[in-house]
Amino acid sequence: MTLPNGITIRSATAADDAAITLLADTAFGMRSPSATLAPEARVFTIENAVVAVDGGRVVGATKATRMTLTVPGERAVEACGIAAVCVAPTHRRRGILRAMYTEQHRRTEADGVALTIFTVSQGTIYGRFGYGPTVRENAVSIDRRFAEFRPSAPDPGGVELATLAEVTDQVRAIYDRWRRIVPGAQVRPEANWAMLFADPVAVRGGGTDLFTLVHPDGYALYRHRRAENVNVAEVVEIRAVTSDAHAALWRALVGLELVQRVDAVLSDNDPLPYLLTDVRLVRTNARYDALWLRLMDIPAALTARTYQRDLDVVLAVADPFRNAGGTFALTIRDGIAECAPTTRPAEVELGIDVLASMYLGAYPARVFTAANRLQAKDSAKARALDEAFATERDAVLGWFF
């Protein structure tokens, strides 16, 4: 594909590897530790990249790989994961991003994949391509000097200290158990495991290498660092399959000596604050989106997950980028959905980006109704839609990409 200004969109080749790395490092303002790996050891290989080329120089790139995503109902769905989307600062406002995305999404449609996901650096760009934020995170800090657990809080024990090298197989197995039950979590590829266990200095932010706490049903990886003149334990990853493992790991983290503060990332309804005598000690410092999603095939995507209540509704879905939109009859019985195009009149109108945000349950329909981004002819239909898309578990991003 060639743009009117002579810029060509094509598949990347091995000869483009160094240029893509330089472009991505420039665009994101950091040296990617994955760039030091052999190309075949990376999560995103050069064979699945799309580049924009101007006079033989790479001026835009986007990478993609196949992922397995857990959706509500503990179901696994194949998705296209996109990463490292960038355009050279010398070539902005020339239609390069849209052209690359057009080619990338054409390929995904040809592959018959129902969902596309990626982590987003800027929140104003991707709604025009039909994406919506679908996983939310909360960066919190706990002043552990004053944190006390309620007398009724579980104290199951079972946590052990270990080096990460000693428990790599156990950590892998726990993660796999956890990701099977949590919406938004993905199967973790070998290349990402290798990066986690290598723990390169470039990802430590000035902190120590990783410390490990392990429980039969969970683990916590954390590092020590000095910040704002206090000693901090930064929780890099905590995964708990059971509530007992969650409580036991947090008791161990809050029990760390010579640490004034514990920093972590929690989902909206994490029970940690309610285990403590003072909920205010879990202070939210930032709340942000962690994953964005686009429905490539609406019937396939909506029938892939389960739901919380019965529903009969006709949805008119607007897609500003591709041809996935239309009018669809969605019927849910006992949690199982059927969805197909219909000529019946629409009862609810919404953008495909809104449907994407609702998909994993983190963003309820009612907030989009209040913002006039979801219009329903009958308020009862809007409430029913809200209840149907709700989930028992918070959506959580399994690993960042």
Image (cartoon, grey):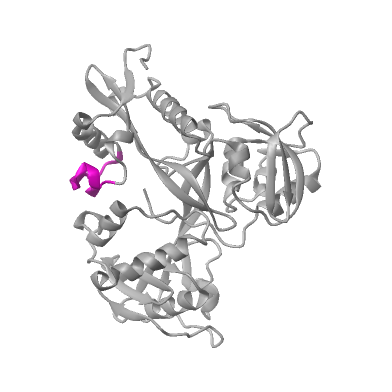
Seen in the picture, residue 302 relative to 127 is either above or below; the reply is below
At x 47%, y 43%, the residue is 79
At x 26%, y 62%, the residue is 197
Compared across the picture, whether 306 is left or right of 376 comes to left
Compared across the picture, whether 242 is left or right of 211 comes to right
Q: Is residue 274 visible?
A: yes
Q: Quadrant of residue 143?
A: bottom left
Q: Is residue 349 visible?
A: no
Asked if the stretch drawn in magenta spans residue 29, the answer is yes
Start-end of magenta stretch: 28-42
At x 57%, y 36%, the residue is 297
The x, y position of residue 157, in whole percent, is: 43, 85
Compared across the picture, whether 213 is left or right of 376 comes to left
* Residue 186 or residue 99, whichever sits in front: 186
Could you tell me which quadrant the N terminus lies in?
A: top left
The x, y position of residue 23, in whole percent, is: 25, 33
Asked if the stretch drawn in magenta spans residue 36, the answer is yes
Seen in the picture, residue 55 relative to 304 is either above or below; the reply is above
Q: How many marks?
A: 0
* Residue 334 or residue 279, whichever sits in front: 334
The x, y position of residue 30, in whole percent, is: 25, 44
At x 64%, y 53%, the residue is 306
The x, y position of residue 246, in whole percent, is: 47, 74
Compared across the picture, whether 251 is left or right of 204 comes to right
What residue occupies the far bottom of the structure in this picture? 151
